[in-house]
Image (cartoon, helix red, strand yellow):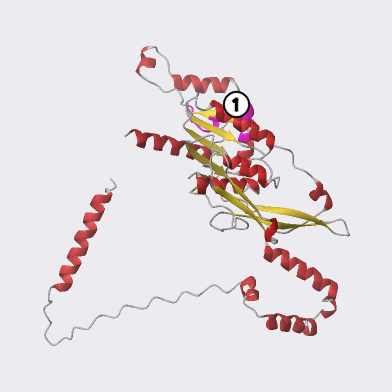
Amino acid sequence: MPRSPALALIGAALLFAGAAKAQSTPQPAVSGVANKPTPSPAAPAQPSAPPTMETLIGSMSGDELQQAIQLLKKNYINADSLNEEEMSRATLQGLLMRIGRGVMLLPAADAARKEASTPSYTEILDGHIGYVRIGSLTAENLKALDATLQTFPAKKVDAIVLDLRAGPATGDFEIAAEFAKRFCAKGKALFTLHKANARQERAFVSDRDPAFPGLVLVLADKDTSGEAEAVAAVLRAQAKALIIGQPTAGRAVEYSDLPLTGGKVLRVPVGEVVLPDRQPLNARGIKPDLPVELAAADKRQIFQMSSEKGMALFVFENERPHLNEAALLAGKNPELEVMEAAQRRGRTQEKTVPRDFVLQRAVDVVTSLAVYQRR
């Protein structure tokens, strides 16, 4: 049986008092033997991990870099391959790798392709939790959100779960600010779209009262990208929202597509989202307050099936019939009947329904808070 925190503290205090008493009590000396402490064997030194290539290159000075390049050109067994064109390839490849996800080199077809807009989805869970899967952050879905929020008071909805795990990034941070305003107090600074030219910066501030004043939870994962990351970060900072799921993509930037002569496109971030505390979101993304894993394939299947079956199926466990006293008196066995029905359908086992563990955790949090508040 686990001990309570109070018992653990009392036990620690008694141990500490006993140790202090033992140290303060004089110990009898053994005749003819000096009281020398017994040396403890030294722990073997753990070998440190060798530095990575990136770490070594990052520690080199400009002179060292030039010296290394010149030595390569003079001593490499295939020095002829280190021509200016290959050096330029290596330079570009190295820059893209070091910069990370902020800069991308794309085929022309990928740059021109536009992702289809994802519609929003709404459902009431457990009678009082509003589940809203935003989908793409578009003007159409914003209108749908406004219409949904207007119905919540009559339906006694006191908590809302905003699912930002679906929908491609569009780069429209103005519409992202509009979504955030629905949950932030009037006059609150939301974020700034920072650019190299300070005169082109845009600061977004809430200019309206929140449409939903209750508890807000946000679901996020690696597909939460761009303007959806800005919404999640703002709701955490200004609406005290709890973020549940996995780290976001780390691409809260505004891109500019720069065409190259060969048809390829260099996509470069020209603006990044900066929060009121001056912390940018790009690259580091957003870490959830409650990390919960969910396989991407399961999420896609759940979202696809939810349009017909609803989300409750993937959140709440369906209670299976059990053998009880009433069944015994009636001469029935519900467990056996379920198994026989499955066999008649040609299946010895029912197909397993995937579970949305992220949404389950959000519902658990809301339920736990409601129980605590009623105490």
Where in the figure is residue 298, as x and y percent of width and height?
A: 60, 39
Query: Where is residue 155 drawn, in percent x and y?
Result: 50, 24
Tell me which corner region of the image, top left, top right, bottom left or bottom right, holds residue 69. bottom right
* Horizontal and vertical percent position of residue 290: 48, 47
Q: Which residue is mark 1?
A: 309
Query: Does residue 44 show up?
Result: yes
Q: Name the quadrant of the C terminus.
A: top left
- Please tell me which residue is depicted at 59% across the width and 30% down the height of the picture: 122
Magenta-span inclusion, residue 313: yes
Q: Is residue 119 visible?
A: no
171 versus 210 height, above or below? below
Question: Secondary structure of the magenta portion, mostly?
Answer: helix
184 lies above or below 334: below
Classify residue 330 as left or right of residue 114: left
Q: Classify the position of the N terminus by image quarter.
A: top left
| Foreground pick, 164 / 152 | 152
Other-residue count near label 1 (Cα within 10 Å), few / some / many at <14 / 14–19 / ≥20: few
Q: Name the residue nearer the viewer: 214 or 324.
A: 214
* Residue extending farthest top: 330
Left or right of 188? Residue 170 is right
Q: Which stretch did the figure color magenta?
A: 302-318
Is the residue 271 above or below the residue 364 in the image?
A: below
- Residue 164 position in % (x across, y down): 60, 41
Residue 319 vertical placement versus 23 (above, below): above
Q: Which residue: 49% across, 36% down?
A: 213
Which of 155/260 is in front? Answer: 155
Q: Does the magenta run of residues contain 347? A: no
How many callouts does the rendering have?
A: 1
Name the kind of residue labelled 1 in the image.
Answer: Lys
Q: Secondary structure at mark 1?
A: helix
